[in-house]
Image (spheres, coloured by chain):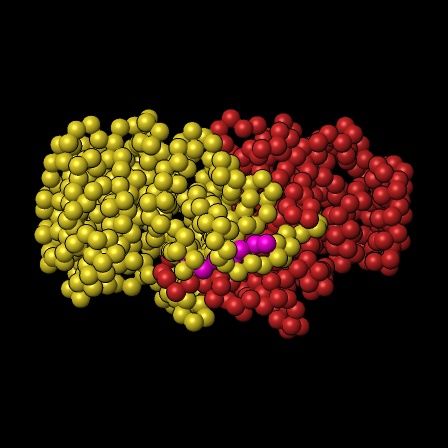
Chain colours: A red, B yellow
């Protein structure tokens, strides 16, 4: 049977500490050349709407040790509204019922069979958190106790869960521009983490004195600046442009998620695609060279040092997601789902065939 | 609702002449820069079997005019047995029930929603046939009446259907090494096409005097040779190595399916992947330059000439499949399936989500 799982299933089956552990091991495999990660591709076209483009994004990964391959697909109607001073990339929930479309298809790398199909949203959030959590694990001070976070959205919660999974965090301060949002976020996260998350009314109030600073927004403008850097601080972001380039340059050590940093963009002729240009140009003027920075698999494999002393400033840039992460997290979710009898079962024959393709 | 379709559904809904017409128009869109085709990628790893590798292959395409995007995925256990003097690439039916795994996922490029999921096998056969059929349409003599075909397998039948869809074919001769196979194939195809398909006992007997010669095997060794070329002949293959390189060089005009001729191969470290090397090296020593040969979209768009006189020898090389073809054929199958109420309907909510991914 092929399992159809929901975001609720994934939420129930994929705890942050487990996801961090499974990614930790999966990166060790990848770093040792025993796993495969296929560069993300974005196919972009116009739609019949003036303000929206269609983006069909896919990324694959295979982990022989876990016996799985995964394809993650996003079928997005994308807009770029200006919100405040920032231009945001916003996926429009244009599917029936006002919904988004992201899928993870999980296959057996031993038989080829489709094991499961699930939405990507909850897993996406957890794997981004888990990845930055591994950045904290391998780069932040061992005795880090305090977190300052910028952002109070969907990704921010996972960032805090991840930090708390790898360090004994005692205090968390959060700033985001909307007072209402940050207060609700802080109340929710305090309940979830069992650590007080305090709302503050400026980025400086969140950052000053924090051992770990996390940027977790969807802005494409910088929101952390060099002048805020303090000795011993670990800095992390979910989108590169969140951090002022000079702040990255000023850090003693910088690592990135993965070397594979250029999605393959294919668009219809003459199409103007806003975000890609900005994101890809980021860091160049400041001399940040993504081809030489150590990667997370290298930190995990011991080929690079994340931190050499308590005084160092460190920075982890989650520069790009990988289909490989969905293979790792997907394998864990699938195993748990089978153990617990979760999900809709469909005949595997619906997704296999008796003709040689 | 999201439709789950079977190979039987696709077979019933996708007639060869309709597929040729829809691809004809889709290539016009692609050639004009109004469609997107994403380069195929192959992620390859070991399996626990000594004689087999795992291959996770994906390719995407979007056609705004038809309002669809497609992702085609193959999750294959691949072996390379020696059969006779040839090394063949054989996908092992390792999924439950002795089955293969190839899927086409069709999305709306207007709403992002998943429209349908279907196996790729029957569509794969028809689109390969339709593509070479378009090669015949734009390159063979208008009055071509006879076909010689080498091969009697799964793909060969579609090649003949396609030739008959675009030219008034009166005689067909078929050679393949196994007498039993070719006789059965000829009887079946005679019944299907209403044109006599005669089995012959040598390749020369199939080729000599034929207006169109079709190679339709899965060999990686040449089976058509330069000495067999005759004035006015149109030559076509489904795999480049089927044709001796010198035979291609000797043709007056050569066109390829698509410029996009290098799948992106990612494999685990040190893995020996047999076929890719051979296929990619094909033509280089003979000076065949895939970067300058005209493509099928160029022939269709009138940017290149397929044939200038009845005496010319022409050659069409179906050098690589495109996800784009599955978007075109998939859109047609989906429209027909909706009209006729075919397929399993599943709630679209199972494949969409209420969280921003």
Q: Would you say A185 lies left or right of A246 here?
A: right
The reply to whether residue B23 is visible in this rendering is yes
Q: Residue at x 57, y 50 (%)?
A: B114
* Picture coordinates of residue A79, whole percent (x, y): 66, 34
| Quadrant in which residue B254 is drawn | top left
* Picture coordinates of residue B60, whole percent (x, y): 48, 45
Q: Please tell me which residue lies in front, B164 or B265.
A: B164
Verify whether residue B347 appears in magenta. no
| Quadrant in which residue B167 is drawn | top left
Q: Would you say A343 lies left or right of B331 here?
A: right
Q: Would you say B334 lies left or right of A75 here?
A: left
Q: Please tell me which residue lies in front, B332 or A62.
A: B332
Q: Please tell me which residue lies in front, A20 or A343.
A: A343
* Picture coordinates of residue B117, whole percent (x, y): 51, 55
What span is in magenta?
A: B1-7
Q: Residue at x 25, y 31 (%)?
A: B306
Q: Please tell me which residue lies in front, B343 or B87.
A: B343
Verify whether residue B3 appears in magenta. yes
In the rendered image, the residue lying farthest to the front is B340
Q: Residue at x 72, y 64 (%)?
A: A12
- Quarter of the image containing the N terminus of chain B? bottom right
């Amino acid at each position: 049977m092929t399992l159809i799982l929901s975001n609720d299933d994934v939420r129930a089956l994929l705890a942050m500490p487990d996801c961090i552990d499974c990614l930790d091991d999966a990166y060790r495999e990848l770093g040792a050349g025993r796993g495969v990660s296929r560069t993300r591709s974005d196919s972009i076209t116009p739609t019949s709407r003036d303000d929206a483009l269609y983006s069909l994004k896919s990324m694959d990964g295979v982990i022989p040790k876990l016996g799985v391959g995964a394809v993650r697909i996003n079928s997005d109607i994308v807009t770029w509204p200006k919100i405040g001073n920032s231009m945001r990339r916003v996926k429009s929930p244009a599917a029936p019922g006002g919904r988004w479309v992201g899928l993870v298809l999980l296959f057996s790398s031993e038989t080829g069979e489709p094991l499961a199909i699930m939405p990507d949203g909850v897993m996406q959030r957890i794997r981004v958190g888990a990845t930055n959590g591994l950045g904290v694990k391998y780069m932040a001070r061992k005795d880090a106790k305090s977190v300052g976070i910028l952002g109070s959205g969907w990704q921010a919660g996972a960032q805090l869960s991840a930090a708390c999974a790898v360090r004994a965090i005692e205090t968390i301060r959060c700033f985001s521009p909307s007072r209402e949002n940050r207060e609700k976020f802080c109340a929710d996260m305090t309940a979830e983490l069992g650590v007080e998350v305090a709302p503050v009314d400026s980025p400086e109030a969140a950052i000053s004195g924090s051992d770990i600073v996390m940027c977790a927004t969807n802005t494409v403008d910088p929101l952390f600046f060099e002048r805020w850097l303090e000795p011993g601080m670990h800095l992390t972001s979910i989108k590169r442009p969140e951090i002022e380039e000079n702040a990255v340059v000023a850090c003693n050590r910088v690592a990135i998620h993965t070397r594979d940093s250029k999605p393959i963009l294919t668009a219809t002729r003459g199409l103007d695609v806003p975000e890609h240009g900005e994101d890809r140009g980021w860091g160049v003027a400041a001399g940040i060279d993504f081809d030489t920075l150590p990667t997370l698999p290298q930190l995990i494999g011991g080929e690079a040092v994340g931190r050499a002393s308590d005084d160092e400033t460190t920075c982890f840039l989650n520069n790009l997601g990988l289909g490989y992460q969905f293979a790792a997290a997907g394998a864990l979710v699938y195993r748990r789902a089978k153990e617990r009898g979760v999900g809709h079962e469909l005949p595997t024959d619906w997704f296999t065939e008796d003709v040689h393709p």
